[in-house]
Image (cartoon, helix red, strand yellow):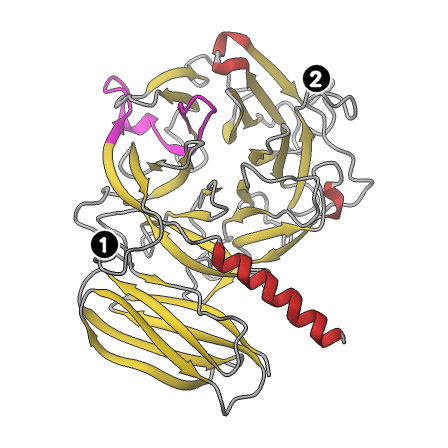
Amino acid sequence: MKFFTLKIIISFFLFLNAASFSQTGDWKYVQKISFPATLADSTISPYSCVVDSKDNLWIISARVTSASAHNALFKAGPEDTLLTEVVDYTAKGDTLNVRALIGLTAIDDDILVTSKCNKLIHPAGVSRGYYYLDGDTSKATLYGFNMGNAGWGTEVYGITATKDSIVFAGLAYGGTSIRGYNFSLSRTAPGYAAYIDMASLTPAEPGGPNSGGFDIIRDCAVDPNEDYNNPETVWYTSRNSLNSTSANGGIARWAGGTQTDPKSYVGQRVTDASSDLSVGSWIPYGITIDNKHKLWVAGIDTTRRWVKAFEVDNFNFANAVEELPAQYSTSNPDPNGAPLRMPTDVAFTKDGYTAYVIDAAQKAAYRFSSKPTGVENEKTQPILFALKQNYPNPFNPSTVISYSLPKGMNVKLVVTNSLGQEIATLIDGFKLAGNYSKTFNAQNLSSGIYFYTLKADNLMFSKKMMLVR
């Protein structure tokens, strides 16, 4: 009876997972958005970006990776091709409160920026938060250590806000951990801009303690439309590794808690077949979640140079499903894409049809556009390299695996067991551009989890499937 119930639950989950991807977007690179020409390149270091409820793009330049950079806040409207500098904390001499900008998020059309304070304020390291009502920098309110707002007596790094105005943050406190802050006017406890009590329990990031703040949570991402009063609703953090040989960096998937009870969150490391998410020592590997629940990751280092979307299942296994067109992508270079060399972060408009990427090497932002295409027309040539979820799933004994190729290429489709042993080669040869399906018969195999992997040129996607006898 228990096994039968488990089969029903798994089948229902996998049905929802497959159904959620019935629509895709055809992403196109639109244009470059430049920083003011009056500013020297050495003073600009794009670090984090966000889009507010009015579709304005906000960017912070930070001294995290460049000692010559200014800590500054920039803005561009939906049609702008030039950013406007709205606050230059360095030029203002605000170096006591702002040693380095380390976090940025939007709460509707309000903007919250977090900073690492000068050690003169406290040698252990503390933070400030600049809150700009309606995005108006003349309406700034300062929160932080020794300012009557509990929970700022540590360095508050990457931040993100739920639709209920609760801010999730990554901290150096407790080794490396998370925290929630109340920016909701409808909540009376804790106080406004104060942290939500953890009852001395600090959820630890899976990579373990940081080394002096060098390997820390750099960005956080919540699903913009989901209910964070539900402990099954997940969110994500990204953390850089200490160095090129350490394995403490990566993407963490948080579940089990709520925005009013964050101490119950448990973070687990996300994995993928191609090791795309084995995050290295570069900073910051910006992340976000779009309105279709996909996790987007900016692969900043020279082995990536891409911005990809991932599906993450309940086993914390990720599959790449989309990529923004980029000229220098190491996995899928597109001559008509943006010239991304060090993409640091990605953000989306509320409708999900416009994406922005900031690039630390190019000192620029790039705008992308997508139009919904509905269910794929099998008679048209696909735009993206794609591997679809097999159907049916779970299956017994056969299932259909479908994939798409944007151009002719050598293709290999294999099936492996949970130990990584190859048990079947379904395709191995050249295929023209088009949509393909292949039936896999598992008549001689036992029940369990299996993987199918599509390799083509230098691309590789994998997905899980379940055989149930």
**Cα separation between marks 1 and 2:** 49 Å
| Picture layout, residue 332 above or below residue 183 | below
Q: Mark 1 points at which residue?
A: 333
Q: Nearer the viewer, mark 1 or mark 2?
A: 1
Determine crowd level at label 1: few under 14, some 14-19, many 20+ residues with C-alpha closer than 10 A.
some
Q: What residue type is labelled 2?
A: Met
Give percent across and percent down for residue 152: 68, 28
Q: What residue type is labelled 1?
A: Pro
Residue 108 or residue 284, whichever sits in front: 108
Q: Please, what secondary structure does the residue beneath circle 1 have? A: loop
| Picture layout, residue 204 above or below residue 400 | above
Q: Residue 398 bears which disc, if any?
A: none
Q: Residue 147 bears which disc, if any?
A: 2
Q: Does the magenta stretch include residue 162?
A: no
| Residue 136 seen from this side | yes
Determine crowd level at label 2: few under 14, some 14-19, many 20+ residues with C-alpha closer than 10 A.
few
Q: Give the range drawn in magenta.
A: 32-60
Outermost residue toward the top in this view: 138
Q: Which residue is drawn at 52% across and 54% down?
A: 249
Q: Is residue 45 magenta?
A: yes
